[in-house]
Image (spheres, rainbow, N blue to C red):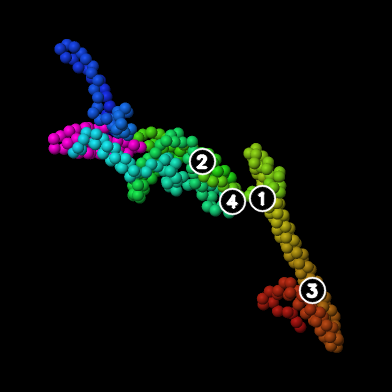
């Protein structure tokens, strides 16, 4: 039997050469706790040394290992040789009663809130934990694994849990989207024990989580929109929309160009019309001035034909002529103001 740093055997053989003769005698361990045929056999015992002394009497330094826990015992001054085996067995039994055995399931449960609680999306709104899911382990590769932890020692238990967490590795393979059924496999668990043994298990859901009811979408009202999920259809729609935008842009540019052309034509025609109106008005005024000049010339000729005694009649006629002339001049001044310094001609 062997352990870390301690090795013991209940018997063995050795080779002895004496006077040229080789013999192989069998050697027995005086520690009867290692012998399965002994009434003091202790399965967990791994050594160590028996002894006898005149002052210390029958002595024994023993060692035992169970579930990774090693214990060392020392008994001295036993009155009989068999008493040291009895006392050692009592010491071992008492020592191991001060520890409790924790299976991998129990250790995992104690560390679950640190490593094995995940969030599930799309959980129903009435879920009591808001989508939080505790994981369990199943199909453990070594279901007999246990870890000894001191009894009534919270600090030691906390250290054991922290050590368990550092030695554990979880791999989530599920998408963690509701619905999730209790016992459904969601990943893999791997644990490396203190002895170096690798223990694996499945990660399963500790409870069921319902999914949110499906929400109505546009595809529920317009089923043809489901075709938009096809990448080729989406690409074709984008091409068509691009062509439509190009046509709209071309139409806007063409309309703006046509409007600008109309504005230029309108401005040219307006200017031509204004120029024609000015020329027409100038011709009318020139014609009017020529007519007035002709009228004045005729009046002067008429005045020369009047005799002295007809001056009164001529004055009356001329006053009427003056009134008509003044009215014409007022109309003329509204269109073309008279030049400065030019006085109305009167008799």
Residue 318 on image: x %, y %: 82, 83
In the rendered image, residue 62 lying in the magenta stretch gets the answer yes
**Few, some or many residues within 10 Å of mark 3 (<14, 14–19, 20+):** some
Per the image, label 2 sits on a secondary structure element best described as: strand
Choose the circle earlier in sequence order: 4 or 2. 4
Asked if the residue at tag 4 contacts the one at tag 3, i.e. Cβ–Cβ closer than 8 Å, the answer is: no
Frontmost residue, 46 versus 198: 46
Q: Name the residue under label 1.
A: 216
Per the image, label 1 sits on a secondary structure element best described as: loop
**Few, some or many residues within 10 Å of mark 2 (<14, 14–19, 20+):** many
Residue 154 on image: x %, y %: 35, 50
Start and end of the magenta stretch?
Answer: 47-76
Q: Mark 4 points at which residue?
A: 124
Tell me if 214 is positioned left or right of 100 in this view: right
Up-down relation of residue 341 to residue 180 (above or below) = below
Asked if the residue at tag 3 contacts the one at tag 2, i.e. Cβ–Cβ closer than 8 Å, the answer is: no
Asked if the residue at tag 1 contacts the one at tag 2, i.e. Cβ–Cβ closer than 8 Å, the answer is: no
Q: Mark 3 points at which residue?
A: 292
Q: Quadrant of the C terminus?
A: bottom right
What residue sits 83% from the left and 83% below the top? Answer: 320
Q: Distance between the residues labelled 3 and 4?
A: 105 Å
Please tell me whether mark 2 or mark 1 is closer to you in this view. 2
Q: Name the residue under label 2.
A: 204
Choose the circle earlier in sequence order: 1 or 4. 4
**Few, some or many residues within 10 Å of mark 1 (<14, 14–19, 20+):** few
Choose the circle earlier in sequence order: 2 or 3. 2
Q: How far apart are marks 2 and 1 (CA)?
A: 32 Å
What residue sits 76% from the left and 77% below the top? Answer: 330
Please tell me whether mark 2 or mark 3 is closer to you in this view. 2
């Amino acid at each position: 039997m062997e352990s870390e740093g301690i090795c013991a055997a209940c018997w063995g053989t050795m080779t002895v050469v004496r006077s040229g003769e080789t013999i192989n005698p069998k050697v027995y361990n005086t520690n009867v706790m290692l012998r399965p045929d002994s009434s003091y056999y202790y399965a967990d015992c791994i050594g160590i040394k028996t002894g006898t002394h005149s002052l210390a009497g029958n002595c024994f330094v023993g060692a035992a290992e169970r579930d990774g826990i090693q214990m060392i015992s020392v008994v001295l001054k036993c009155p009989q040789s068999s008493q040291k085996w009895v006392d050692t067995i009592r010491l071992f039994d008492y020592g191991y009663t001060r520890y409790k055995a924790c299976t991998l399931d129990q250790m995992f449960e104690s560390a679950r809130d640190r490593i094995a609680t995940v969030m599930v999306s799309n959980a129903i709104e009435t879920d009591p934990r808001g989508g939080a899911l505790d994981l369990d382990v199943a199909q453990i590769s070594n279901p007999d694994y246990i870890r000894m932890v001191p009894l009534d020692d919270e600090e030691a238990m906390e250290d054991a849990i922290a050590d368990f967490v550092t030695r554990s590795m979880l791999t989530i393979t599920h998408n963690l989207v509701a619905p999730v059924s209790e016992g459904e496999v969601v990943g893999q668990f791997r644990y490396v024990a203190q002895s170096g043994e690798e223990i694996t298990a499945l990660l399963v859901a500790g409870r069921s989580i319902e999914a949110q009811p499906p929400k109505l979408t546009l595809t529920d009202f317009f089923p043809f929109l489901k075709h938009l999920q096809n990448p080729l259809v989406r690409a074709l729609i984008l091409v068509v929309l691009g062509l439509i935008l190009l046509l709209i842009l071309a139409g806007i540019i063409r309309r703006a160009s046509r409007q600008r052309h109309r504005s230029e034509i309108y401005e040219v025609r307006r200017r031509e019309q204004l120029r024609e109106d000015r020329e027409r008005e100038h011709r009318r005024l020139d014609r009017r001035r020529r007519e007035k000049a002709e009228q004045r010339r005729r009046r002067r000729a008429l005045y020369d034909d009047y005799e002295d005694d007809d001056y009164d009649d001529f004055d009356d006629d001329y006053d009427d002529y003056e009134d008509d002339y003044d009215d014409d001049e007022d109309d003329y001044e509204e269109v073309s103001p008279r030049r400065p310094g030019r006085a109305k001609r009167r008799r």
